[in-house]
Amino acid sequence: MPRVKGSPKKFVKSGSSANSNTWVFLMKGESLESSEGVHPDMVKLRHPASNQAAMFVFSPGDLTIQEVMTFDENKRSWFIDDNVRSDGKMHLSTPIDPIFLILPYLRKSQQVMPLEQCLRDEDYPETTRLVKCQSLKLSLVADRKGDESLQAFKYNEDKTLSWLRKKVERVAEIVRQKGIHVSQGAVSANYVKSSKYEGGTESEYMKYAHGIVAEYLAEDLSKKLHQYLNLPDDSEQKKRKLSSPKDATDEKRPKKEAQEESPRNGALDLTKPEKLNILTAS
């Protein structure tokens, strides 16, 4: 997913006092600035994955849109001017491809209709502003019908899956370049700097990237993309792990050593942790 280059900017919304509705924002991207002094506009839109309300920020002129992420920890506060703000949350904005927000509406529509009409949402009226986003290439996920000025589209699933595949491949490549651990134990391993990590397999990178992209997809579309990418299911991986042969090192151990480790009288010696793996043998 594209990222706008630029240095982080602090954006603080303040009221008449320190106890008013005040928050601290970090925004990235020169496109969020305007020579006329127009500020970014924060709105609620329907999240494409959860179908629930989520916060987004339109740049001046609605040329770009960014998702609002909230970093929250206990026992945090902000010093703003001469005041202390007890709410220590920090809000971050990250660029998002507007097509992700438009996809649910295109999929829901069963007929060809102008994009602005397709995006009408009584619960989230600001959704129609997405039509103004620059570089909006809906032909990547839909078929254009009629005159170009009409901006009428119909959802095309084949195009969508192909477009999403490229998104996943791009994310996978970035993850690979960053040296992010994608194998088992990746959550903890990413906090440890190590030069010994040789990288994951192509399938592991793609599956990891799919998980990131799927955070912006409806569940059924996420599953279709998973199948489209020919990624292994978790159940298959677990089955493969349980049925895998013992390590080659176990097979090459001296016979005497193996006999010494064998439990006597057929009883398991559970006092030694290394023996517990016998309980999971196939």
Image (tube, grey):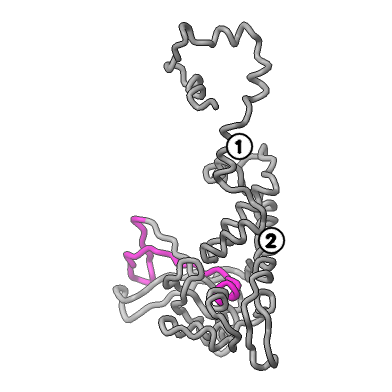
Q: Is residue 132 visible?
A: no
**Quarter of the image with the N terminus in it:** bottom right
Q: Is 73 placed left or right of 126 in the picture?
A: left
**Quarter of the image with the C terminus in it:** top right
The image shows residue 123, relative to residue 262, as above or below, that is below
> Going 70% across and 91% down the picture, which residue do you hit?
148
The image shows residue 64, relative to residue 76, as above or below, that is below
Q: Is 258 placed left or right of 270 in the picture?
A: right
Residue placed under numbered mark 1 in the picture? 240
- Give the residue type at disc 1: Arg
Residue 267 image-quadrant placement: top left
- Residue 61 horizontal/vertical position (percent): 57, 87
Residue 54 image-quadrant placement: bottom left
Q: Which residues are magenta?
A: 74-102
Q: Is 12 placed left or right of 218 in the picture?
A: left
Residue placed under numbered mark 2 in the picture? 170
- Give the residue type at disc 2: Arg
Instruction: Say which element carries label 1.
Output: helix
- Residue 178 horizontal/vertical position (percent): 66, 52
> Going 66% across and 18% down the picture, which residue do you hit?
251
Instruction: Say which element carries label 2.
Output: helix
> Going 57% across and 59% down the picture, which residue do you hit?
223
The image shows residue 197, relative to residue 159, as above or below, that is above
Structural distance between the alpha carbons of marks 2 and 1: 28 Å
Q: Residues within 10 Å of mark 2 (few under 14, many from 20)?
A: some
Mark 2 vs 1, N-terminal side? 2
In the rendered structure, does residue 89 fall within the stretch colored magenta?
Answer: yes
- Residue 170 horizontal/vertical position (percent): 69, 61
The image shows residue 216, relative to residue 33, as above or below, that is above
Q: In this orientation, which residue lies closer to the viewer: 166 or 197?
A: 166
